[in-house]
Image (cartoon, grey):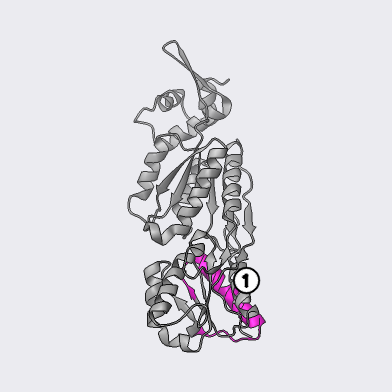
């Protein structure tokens, strides 16, 4: 066990700063308190107070999940994945707490600091669609383990722990699935986020490999939401007179596409074939049930929880790892074979 004088030497502060930090004195900054607390945890400091001994222990067993604050139905895939994370964490005796925090929102960094002052979160899983440099830098400086799950480009972020699906391969597989069924005129509906950029690049690659020149007007852009997808299809109705298939890059967008096409008099898959991307249960309860490129969500969640707990248990920072899983096709009722 370690003394306060030894803690002071390790932390590079005075012994009085150590005492005030461990008693949570308001004159000491949170960052200094956290640094000293971690050293106390690492070296097994025991505090003697009023006849009681308090052993500093890191066994809080709570994982924070950082997400962006979006409408529930616009992010069903995120909510589905969070459900898997909660299940996987509970099996390893960890609690989870969902925190809608992003540095792009005013006051979010202050809220994150306030949560950390409560001193019960061991690490974070970050599920932001945009890389949050401010949060990453802050958690790294504080020595708090964190893992990025989903929404990462296949060619970026080698300096962080990341677990994701190969979205480029997903776009390629979806388009190849339609090509193998005889379709040549294929539209895609995408969104302005990095995983969608990878999916679009995979779509282009599959077309070029089949000897088809990609058309710019066949790449439709919209927000990743039901309403945006519905409106985008209605605005581009004329395109579908020459098109036999569409690759929609998320399941929630696909429900908007199906309803918009039905409203315009198209039948699926007789007139227009559809393949989606995500692969959770939404595709199985749609009418028609739609084909989808599926993320191995259960495996992704298990890897994220296991990797984070592994990092929480370490006293020294390890080199970051990037784990990229391959998606797969779920065939249902929304793609017609053209002979």
In the depicted view, which residue is nearer to us: 250 or 256? 256
In the depicted view, which residue is nearer to us: 147 or 300? 300
SS for tag 1? Answer: helix
Position above or below: 260 against 108 = below
Residue drawn at point x = 45 percent, y = 65 percent = 252
Determine if the magenta segment contains residue 99: no
Tell whether 80 sits left or right of 326. Answer: left
Assess disc 1: are there few (<14), some (14-19) or many (≥20) residues with their C-alpha within 10 Å of its C-alpha: many
| Residue 134 x/y as whole percent | 44, 52
Tell whether 121 sits left or right of 25. Answer: right
In the depicted view, which residue is nearer to us: 161 or 201? 201
Determine if the magenta segment contains residue 199: yes
Q: Main secondary structure of the magenta part?
A: helix
User: Which residue reaches farthest top?
Assistant: 51
Residue drawn at point x = 58 percent, y = 71 percent = 171
Q: From this viewpoint, is residue 133 visible?
A: no
State the residue position of label 1: 173
Position above or below: 194 against 31 = below
In the depicted view, which residue is nearer to us: 152 or 190? 190
| Residue 293 x/y as whole percent | 58, 66
Residue segment shown in magenta: 189-216
Q: How many marks?
A: 1
Q: From this viewpoint, is residue 335 visible?
A: yes
Image quadrant containing the N terminus: top right
Image quadrant containing the C terminus: bottom right
| Residue 316 x/y as whole percent | 61, 38
Position above or below: 69 against 179 = above
Tell whether 245 sits left or right of 223. Answer: right
| Residue 239 x/y as whole percent | 45, 86
């Amino acid at each position: 066990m370690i003394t306060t004088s030894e803690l002071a030497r390790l932390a590079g502060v005075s012994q009085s700063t150590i005492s005030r930090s461990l008693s949570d004195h308001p004159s000491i900054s949170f960052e200094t308190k956290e640094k000293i607390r971690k050293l106390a945890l690492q070296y097994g400091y025991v505090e003697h107070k009023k006849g009681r001994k308090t052993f500093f222990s890191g066994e809080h067993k709570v994982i924070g999940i950082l997400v962006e604050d979006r409408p529930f139905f616009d992010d069903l895939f995120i909510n589905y994945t969070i459900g898997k994370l909660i299940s996987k964490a509970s099996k390893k005796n960890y609690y989870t707490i969902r925190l809608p925090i992003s540095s792009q929102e005013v006051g979010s960094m202050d809220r994150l600091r306030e949560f950390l002052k409560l001193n019960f979160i061991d690490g974070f899983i970050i599920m932001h669609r945009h890389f949050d440099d401010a949060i990453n830098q802050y958690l790294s400086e504080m020595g708090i383990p964190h893992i990025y799950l989903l929404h990462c480009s296949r060619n970026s972020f080698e300096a962080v722990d990341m677990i994701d699906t190969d979205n480029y391969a997903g776009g390629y597989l979806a388009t190849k699935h339609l090509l193998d069924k005889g379709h040549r005129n294929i539209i895609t509906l995408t969104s302005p986020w990095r995983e969608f950029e990878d999916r679009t690049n995979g779509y282009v690659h599959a077309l070029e490999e089949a000897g088809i020149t990609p058309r710019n007007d066949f790449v439709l852009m919209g927000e990743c939401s039901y309403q945006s997808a519905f409106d985008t299809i209605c605005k581009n109705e004329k395109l579908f007179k020459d098109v036999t298939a569409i690759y929609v890059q998320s399941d929630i967008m696909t429900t908007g596409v199906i309803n918009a096409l039905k409203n315009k008099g198209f039948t699926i898959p007789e007139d227009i074939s559809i393949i989606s991307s995500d692969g959770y249960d939404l595709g199985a309860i749609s009418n028609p049930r739609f084909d989808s490129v599926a993320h191995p969500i259960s495996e992704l969640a298990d890897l994220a929880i296991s990797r984070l707990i592994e990092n929480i248990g370490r006293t020294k920072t390890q080199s970051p790892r990037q784990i990229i899983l391959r998606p797969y096709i779920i065939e249902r009722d929304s793609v017609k074979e053209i002979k």
